[in-house]
Image (cartoon, grey):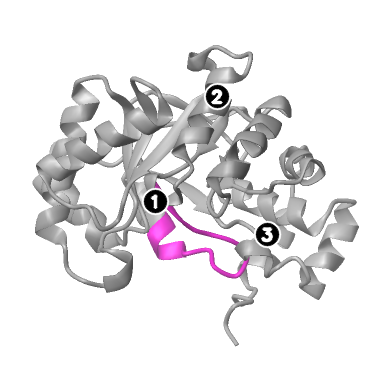
Amino acid sequence: MYVNKKNFTFHNGVDIPSIGFGTWQIPNEEAYDAVTLALKNGYTLIDTAQAYHNEENVGKAIEDFDLPRESIFLTSKLPADIKGYDETLEAFNKTLTNLGMDYVDLYLIHAPWPWDEVGKDCTKENIQTWKAMEKLYTDGKIRAIGVSNFSKQDIQALIDACDIVPMANQIPFYIGRDQKELLDFCKKNSILVEAYSPLATGDILNSPEIMDMAKKYGVTTAQLSIRYCLEKDTLPLPKSTHESRIIENSQLDFTLSPEDVKKLDAMKDVRDK
């Protein structure tokens, strides 16, 4: 079970802050202010992606903020529809240009298939993509490499065909969707699970059960939901453009009892209608 700590550590020894600031669905024109607010309030892990179309202002906010670059952990992602060795190198260079930086801390394959062809078998293409990422990693352009939205089978294919085991798998993870089998597989292979949409994009905030439990701990439903991700040894990536919520989402200095974690484990996905 998670113990309060500032960092998780990838299997290559690189540390990553234990909670991050997500920028999905934050338009480029709003990203500068949102990232600046996050940095101002203590977040040092910022998560973006080329597909979010906000890398430029995410990078500018980091550049303009009064913290050395090495104090900030920046993640970006290869667009899901881009596969192949040379294509990956080209897309990564575009991300560096967008960000105005010469390296990123973590780079992920955004999905194992294009978003308009979910479930398509792209195993061969993903292997070539991963080999390009291994090159970028060994060349020092990326401090850690990983995947996003990958299943056990998708990850195993990379492990079997390539040299480096992914260091992270960023997946949707929240109360009611604990992805136990995938989480166990990742832990077995020393792959850190990052929990995106830890609030189910807001869908769980009005759950009566979660609201009741949050009252018991004297916290908000959002704080309880994010804390749950930490208790499951995953790294949550909450997102907000409101400063009060940005602050609230990082105030997690409490622990859930094992009994309450089990109750939350037993909850059904609020999105299952």
Task: Residue at 50%, 40% (x, y): give it.
Answer: 47
Q: Which mark is residue 14?
A: none
Q: How many marks?
A: 3
- Single out the residue that lies furthest toward the bottom: 273
Label 2 to label 1, Cα distance in Å?
Answer: 19 Å
Q: Which residues are magenta?
A: 169-183
Amino acid type of the residue tagged 3 in the rendering: Val
Residue 135 visible within the image:
yes
Which amino acid type is shown beneath numbered disc 1?
Ala
Mark 3 and mark 1 residues within 8 Å of each other at the beta carbon: no
Closest to the observer, 100 or 191: 100
Q: Are marks 2 and 1 in contact (CB under 8 Å)?
A: no
Q: Secondary structure at mark 1?
A: helix
Residue 135 among magenta residues? no
Alpha carbon distance from label 3 to label 1: 34 Å
Q: Secondary structure at mark 3?
A: helix
Q: Residue at x 40, y 64 (%)?
A: 181
* Residue position marked by numbered label 1 in the rendering: 51
Q: Quadrant of residue 204?
A: bottom right
Q: Residues within 10 Å of mark 3 (few under 14, many from 20)?
A: some
What type is the residue that disc 2 sits on?
Ile
Q: Where does label 2 land, which residue?
A: 62
Number of the label disc, if any, that sits on residue 261: 3
